[in-house]
Image: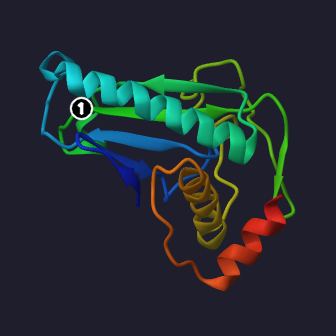
């Protein structure tokens, strides 16, 4: 689900999994396959995207810090250069009457990915994930990055209950 786009990048909200609240994938739109193919404009724009997303997650969810990774994983981005934007939290979050804990704050976010017991789990259902998306989108609107768009009333009501 596209959160927003720039000239060179699509910022994809990870609708399928919010194990790390606010996580996104940033995908190059110019079909660049490796980092060395990126031009100065693409690098500059990528830096601005990281700053914007960091501010969005700090304002919307009180993110403590950010993990930003490039793993050249063609399965995610159809072989275009992509980056993972992963907000991290050194404190508990409470959304939708659920307690979210970043179980391995301060460690590599994929360290325990293959462990059935230690892996960070997504605790939100689809409707709740859409509210998380809307909360990020609303922050982008406040910053003037995106324009207002219609939302359904239930998402707006749930977004208010997150606060």
The quarter of the rendered structure image containing the C terminus is bottom right
Secondary structure at badge 1 equals loop
Q: Is residue 42 left or right of residue 60?
A: left
**Residue farthest along the bottom direction in this orientation:** 153
Q: Nearer the viewer, residue 4 or 98?
A: 4
**Residue 92 placement (x, y as % from top left):** 85, 40
Residue 114 seen by the camera = no
**Which residue is disc 1 drawn over?**
81
The quarter of the rendered structure image containing the N terminus is bottom left
Q: Quadrant of residue 161?
A: bottom right
Q: Nearer the viewer, residue 111 or 101?
A: 101
Q: Residue at x 23, y 39 (%)?
A: 8
Q: Residue at x 59, y 69 (%)?
A: 126
**Residue farthest along the front direction in this orientation:** 144
**Residue farthest along the top direction in this orientation:** 36
**Residue 94 placement (x, y as % from top left):** 85, 52
**Residue 65 placement (x, y as % from top left):** 66, 25
Residue 108 versus residue 160 in the image, above or below = above
Residue 12 seen by the camera = yes
**Residue 81 placement (x, y as % from top left):** 23, 32
Residue 153 versus residue 149 in the image, above or below = below
Q: Is residue 129 left or right of residue 84?
A: right
Q: Quadrant of residue 137?
A: bottom right
């Amino acid at each position: 689900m596209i959160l927003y786009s720039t000239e060179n990048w699509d910022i994809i909200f990870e609708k399928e999994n919010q194990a790390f609240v606010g996580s996104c994938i940033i995908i190059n739109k110019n079909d660049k396959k490796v980092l060395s193919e990126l031009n100065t404009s693409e690098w500059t724009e990528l830096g601005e995207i990281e700053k914007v997303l960091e501010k969005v997650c700090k304002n919307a969810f009180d993110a403590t810090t950010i993990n930003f990774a490039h793993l050249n994983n063609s399965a995610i981005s159809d072989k275009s250069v992509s980056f993972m934007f992963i907000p991290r939290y050194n404190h508990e979050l409470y959304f939708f009457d659920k307690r979210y804990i970043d179980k391995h704050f301060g460690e590599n976010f994929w360290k325990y990915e293959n462990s059935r017991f230690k892996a960070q789990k997504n605790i939100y259902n689809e409707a709740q994930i859409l509210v998380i998306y809307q909360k990020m989108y609303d922050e982008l609107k406040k910053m003037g990055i995106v324009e207002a768009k219609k939302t359904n009333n239930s998402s707006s009501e749930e977004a208010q209950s997150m606060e």
